[in-house]
Image (cartoon, rainbow, N blue to C red):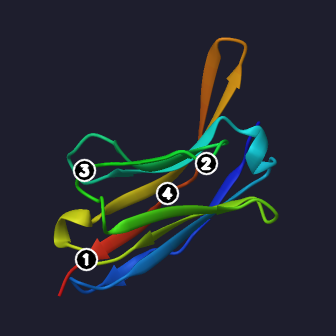
Amino acid sequence: QVQLVESGGGLVQPGGSLRLSCATSESILSLYSMGWYRQASGKQRESVASMTSSGRTSYADSVKGRFTISRDNVKNTVSLQMNSLKPEDTAVYLCNARTLGGYTYRDYWGQGTQVTVSS
């Protein structure tokens, strides 16, 4: 059972920055991948950014060039630096960890943290 604890989030003006962090109870390198999803009110959950254990990253088109995912292999944390925030980035952001056992993926989720971009 992978436990995830998120921190960061809050209220920021358009054009501002925020940093989210997620600590995992497992060695981050033992996980298949870690990443961030978001879910805005009335919308489906969507992937924002992810990083595999090998360090390969992927981003949603809507955040490319503005968001950066990174990790600390010693502290077992993954972070999401969000710059040039827009009102449409407002959502609950959830940390995700994915494990691979045999041919089976399993997802674990943090409790979510609210990000609100508003003037």
Q: How many marks?
A: 4
Gap in angstroms between the C-alphas marked 4 and 2: 23 Å
Circle 3/circle 2 CB separation < 8 Å: no
SS state under label 4: loop
Query: Which of labels 3 and 2 is toward the front?
Result: 2
Instruction: Answer yes or no: is residue 96 visible.
Output: no
Residue pictured at 37% horizontal, 82% vertical: 17
Q: Position of residue 109 (x, y in %)?
A: 57, 44
Residues at discs 4 and 1 in contact (Cβ within 8 Å): no
Residue 72, picture quadrant: bottom right
Which mark identifies residue 112? Answer: 4
**Which quadrant of the rendered structure holds the C terminus?**
bottom left
**Which numbered mark, 3 or 4, is in the foreground of this view?**
3
- Name the residue beneath numbered marker 2: 55
Residue at 18% from the left image edge and 64% from the top image edge: 88
Residue at which label 1 appears: 117
Crowdedness near tag 3: few (<14), some (14–19) or many (≥20) residues, C-alpha within 10 Å: few
Mark 4 or 2, closer to the camera:
2
Residue ID for mark 3: 61
Circle 2: is it few (<14), some (14-19), or many (20+) Cα within 10 Å? Answer: few
Q: Amino acid at mark 2?
A: Gly
Q: Which element type, helix, strand or loop, lies under badge 3?
A: loop
User: From mark 3 to mark 4, how far is it between C-alphas?
Assistant: 22 Å
Badge nearest the viewer, 4 or 1:
1
Relative height, residue 18 to residue 66 (above, below): below
Q: Amino acid at mark 4?
A: Gly
- Give the image location of residue 63, x and y in percent: 29, 59
- Badge 2 or badge 1: first in the primary sequence: 2
Amino acid on which the number 3 mark rests in the picture: Asp
